[in-house]
Amino acid sequence: MSSLPYLDPNAPFTLNSVQTLDTLINCMKSINPQERDYAVKVLNDIKEKGNLWIHVDTIIGNTSNTDTKFFALSLLEHVIVTAWNAVPEDQRSGIKNFIVKQVIDNSSSGASHFLNKLNLILVQIVKREWTTTWRDFIPEICSASKSSQALCENTMNVLKLLSEEIFENTRTPLSTAKRNELKQAMNLEFSKIYELCNWVLRTAAMHPGAVQNSLIKSCLSTLAAFLDWVPPVHIFSGDLVTFLLESYLDNQLFRTATLECLTEVAGVTMEINPNDPSFALYQTAVINLLSLSMNKLAQSFPPKTTSFATIFMETDPNMQLHMKLFAQKLSLFLLAFAQNHLTLCESSALQSQGTETESVIIISLDALLSYMVSLTEFPDDEVFKICCEFWHTVSKHLYEQRVAGWLENKIWSMAYRANLSKARMLLIPRTAKPTEVLISVDEQGNVVREKLQDTENIALYDLMRETLVYLTHLDPEDTEHIIMLKMAKQMDGSEWSWTRISSLAYAIGSISGSMDEEHEKRFLIHVIKDLLALCEGKRGKENKAIVATNIMYVVMQYPRFLSNHWNFLKTVVKKLFEFMHELHPGIQDMSVDTFLRIAQNCGADFVVPHDIQDQREPFIYEVIRIMSATISELQNHQKLVYYQAIGHILSNIKTYEEMDYHLTGALALVQAQWTQLLSLISQNLAVIQDPEVTRSLAFCIKVNESLCQSLGHFYYIQLGKIYNDMIQLYTTTVQFLNSEVAAKGPIVVGHTHIVSARALCKRILNLISTYIKICQTPQLLVEHFIQPVFEIVVRDFVNSPIELRDAEVITLVADIINKLGREATGYMQVVLGVFLDSVLNMLVSDYTNYPEQRSSFFELLKAVASQCFESLLQLPIERFKVAIDTILWASKHQSTQHAELGLVTLKQILQSLESSGVVANYFYQHFYVYVLTEIFAIMTDGLHIANFKHHSQILRYLFYIVDSGLITAPLTEGIAADANKAFVISHLTQILATNFTNMNRVQIETLILSMFNRCNDQVSFKNVLRDFLVTTKEIAVDNESFYAEEREKEIEEARRLIQEKKALVPGLLPQFTNERSS
C-alpha cells in the first residue's frame, strides 16, 4: 500500500507523526479492504512493538480525531495491564498525573466514550498503586468531588468500576492475595465513599432541584455497589434505610436505583442470638424495612388491585423499558427479602400475637406476596424467572417450617394461603417444557421436532418442578382443583391451545410423588382419561400430536401408579404402540422413549401373569408376537431404543429356557435379516463392497448391542448363537479392507464403501466389549469368547496397515484384561509383545495423531498395570523400560485426558510395587531418578498444570519412600542405601539450579527439605509445590488447576447434600430410572 503512510514505532515522534496516525486511524473505516488490513497491521505493530505510549499526551493534545485519542489511550492501557511494574517510577507517576488531569478536564463532557476509557485506565492504575504508592486515592477523589457536580458524578462512576473490578470481575488478572489486599483497603476506606454518597443524597433531598438527576442516579447506583461492604450493624442501626424509603422510593425518577440499594440491604443478615441486646435492634430494622417499603409502594401501587402487566401494556412504548426495569428490580428486592428474612418476620409475629406488630407484619407480608403474584403475570421472561425463584423460596421455606397446627396459624390463613393459591393458578399454565418432550411449537406456530435442548428452559423447568412439588405438599387439594379446572377448560375448548395443554401436562408430570398414593391414583386416572379422550376427540394431525406427546410425558412420570395398576399400564403401552405408527415429527421418538422408561421401571410386570380374565399368559408373549407390526414404521434409531426396552423387560426373567424362548422371538426379524445377508456374502464375497449390505449388517449388530446393554449377563445365550459367524464376518471384512488399501493406497480409506465396512468391524468389536463388561462369569468368557479375540482379531490388527488399525481393538483388549484380572496373565506375551509394538508404531511420531487409538492405548496400559502387574515385572529390563518410557511419554501429552491416563498408570505401578520387596528395590535402582526427574519437568513446564493433583501425589510418594527408608537399595552407584536422601537432595538441587536461575541454592535446598518434611501429608506437600510454582512464576497463583481436587470434592459434597435433602421431600427426586444407550 504505497499510497498509505507508515509510522515507524521506533522513529522519533513529531507532530507529523500525529497526522500520520490520524490517517491510519481513518483507514480503519475505509471501504477498501486492503487499506483496512494495512492499517490494522501497522497499528498492531505500533501497539505490540513500539514505545508510542510515552507520547500519548502529545497525541491527545494535538489531534481532534476522537478515534485517534481512543487509540492512544488503548496504547497506554496495554502498557498498564501488561508491563506496569517495568515502567520507571517517574514515568508511572507522570502517567498517573496525566490520567487524573484528563479525567478532571473531561468530566464536564458527560458520559462520552473517551471519558469512560479514561475511567477504565484510572481504575487499572488504582488496582496496582492503591495499596502502595497511592494510599490516599479514595480520600483525594472523594474530597475533590465536592467541587463540581460533573466531577462528582464521574467519581461515582469510577468508584463503581473499581468495585466491579475488585469484587465482581474474577476474570481480571489479580492474584488472590492482591484481591484480598484491595478488599481490605476498601474496608478501611469505605467510610469516605459512604459519607460522599450520604452527602449527595441528603443534599438532594433537602434542596430539591439543586442536584442533577443524573448525579443522584449515579450516587444510588454506586451506593448499591458498595453496600455489601457496610458493616451490618451500621446498616440496621442507622437511618439509611428509612431515609432511602422516605426520600427516593416514591420518586419515579429514582425508584429503580433505590430498589437496587434496598435489594442489597435485604441481602444483609446478622447471625445474632435472640438473647443478645442488639437482636431487638436488628429485628426492628428488618420489620421496618418490610413495612415501610410496602407502605411506600402501596401509595403508588395498591397491592390488592395493582396489575403490573396492565400498567406495562398501557405504558407509552417509549417508556416500557423503564417499566420492565422497575419490575425486575422490584422482584429482585422482594426475592432478596424472602430469602433472608421470612423466618425472622414470622417468629416476630408469633411472639407478638394480639399486638399491632403482629398485624403490621401480616399485612406487610400479604402485600409482599400480592406484589409477587402481580409480577408473576408480568410479560417478561426475566421477571418471571425471578418470580419462580421467589415462589420456590417461599414454598420450600413453608414446607420446612411446617409443624402441627400450622394451618390454623394466623400468618398462613391471612397472608399465605390465598396468595399461594394464586401462585399455583399462575405457575401451572406456564410450566416450562421438560427435556423428555421432543416436540415443540416454533415461532411460526408449527409443531416441530425439537432439535436442540434449551439449557435456560431446562433450568427453569427444574426450578418450577420443585416449586410445584412444594406447593402441592402445602395444599394438594388446591393443586388438584386448579389442574382439574384448567383441564375442564381444555376439554370444553374454552381455553384450548397447544401451549396451554402442554404446560398443563408438564405441571401434572412435575408433581409426581408429591401426593399420597390414594390421592395420586384418583387424580391421575381422571387426568389420563381426560387426555386420552382429548386425543380421540381432537381433529387434525398436529392437535393429536400435541396431545399424544403430553399423554406420553405424563405416564412417564408415574411408574409407581402404572406398576400398581396393570390394566392401566397395559392400556398405556398399547397406546404407545399405536403412537409408534404416527409419522408426525417427534411422536415416534417420544413413544419409544416412553416405552423404554416404562420397561426400565415396570418391566417385571410384563413377564408375570396377571389375574385378569382376558390374559392367560404374561404380556411379553403378546408384545413379541406383535413386534413385527409394532416396529414396522419406526426408523432404525427408534428400533434400537425399542430393543433396549425389550432387553430391560427380559432382564426380569430368571430361567434359561424362558429367556432363550423370548430372545429367539424378540430377535426373529433381525436374525432372519442377519442370516440372509451372511448367505449372500458366502455366495459372493463381492457384495461386501456394497455399503447397503455392510450398513444392514452393522444394524443387526447394533440391535444386539442395544439388547445386550439392557439385558445384561444372560445375553450370552444370544451371543453364543452368532459369535462364530460374527468373527468370520469380521475376518472377511478385514481381509477385504486390507486388499483395498494394498491395491489403491491409503487414500481409499475415505471412500464410502470402506467407511461403511470399517463401521461394521467396529460394531462387532463394540458388541463383544459391551458383553465382556457386563458378564458376571469371567470363566464363561474364557471358555467361549476370548480365544478368538487374540487368535484372530489381535492378529488381524497387527497385520493390517496403520490406517486400518481401529481403536476398538485396543479397547476390547483393555476390557478383557480389566474383566479377567490376573486370569489375563496368559495373554500378556501377545499384549506386551507384538501388539504393544504395533500400537506404538502408530503413535510415537507425535502427540496428536490417532487420538482415539491414543486414548484406548493408554487405557490398555492402565489395565495392564492394575490387573497384570506381575507380567510387567517379568519382562526383560529393555522391554520394561519401553513400558515405563511409554507411560511417561503419555504423561507429557498436552491433552489433559491422555496425560492423566499416563499419570494414573504410573501411580498404579508405584502402588503395586509397595508389596513387591526385592523387585521394588530393583525398579527404583533403575528408574527412581528417571521418574522423579521427568515428573518434575512435566509439572514445571507450564503446559500440564491441569494434572497438578496427580503430579503432587506421585512426587509426594517418591519423597516419602526415600524419607521413610522403604527403598533399601542405593539409588546410584557409589553410595549406601542410607545416603539416598542426601543423593536426592543433591540431584534435585542441581536440576532446579539449572532450570530456575531466579532461585539461589539456599532457596532450592530449603524447598527440597520442605518437601521431605511434609511428604507424610498430601495436603501440606501440595501446598509446598504450589508455593514453589508461584515463587518461580511458572504458573499464576489463581490457576484453577491448583485447587481442582479441592473444588471437585466440594462440588461432589454439595451435590450429595442436595440429593440427601431432596430425598426427604417426596416428589423432588423422580420416581423413574432414566437411562438410554447411546
Image (cartoon, helix red, strand yellow):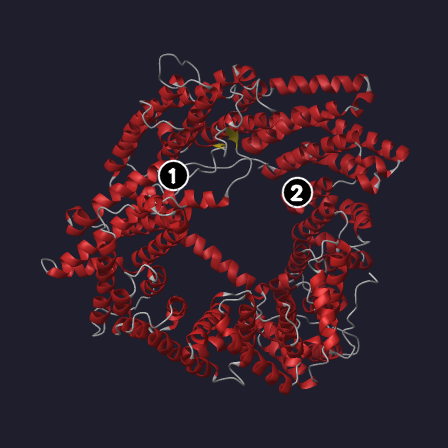
Q: Position of residue 33 (x, y in %)?
A: 75, 54
Badge 1 density bin: few <14, some 14–19, many ≥20, Cα 10 Å:
many
Residue at 72% of width from left, 27% of height from top?
Answer: 726
Q: Position of residue 163 (x, y in %)?
A: 46, 70
Element carrying mark 2: helix
Picture quadrant of residue 512: top left
Would residue 483 be found to the left or right of residue 666 on screen?
Answer: left
Q: Position of residue 563 (x, y in %)?
A: 38, 28
Would residue 696 be found to the left or right of residue 615 on screen?
Answer: right
Mark with earlier residue (2, 1) = 1
Element carrying mark 1: loop
What label sits on residue 815 in the rendered view? 2
Badge 2 density bin: few <14, some 14–19, many ≥20, Cα 10 Å:
many
Is 1067 drawn above or below residue 224 in the view shown? Answer: above
Report if residue 512 is visible in the image: no
Amino acid tagged 1 = Thr
Residue at 14% of width from left, 61% of height from top?
Answer: 357
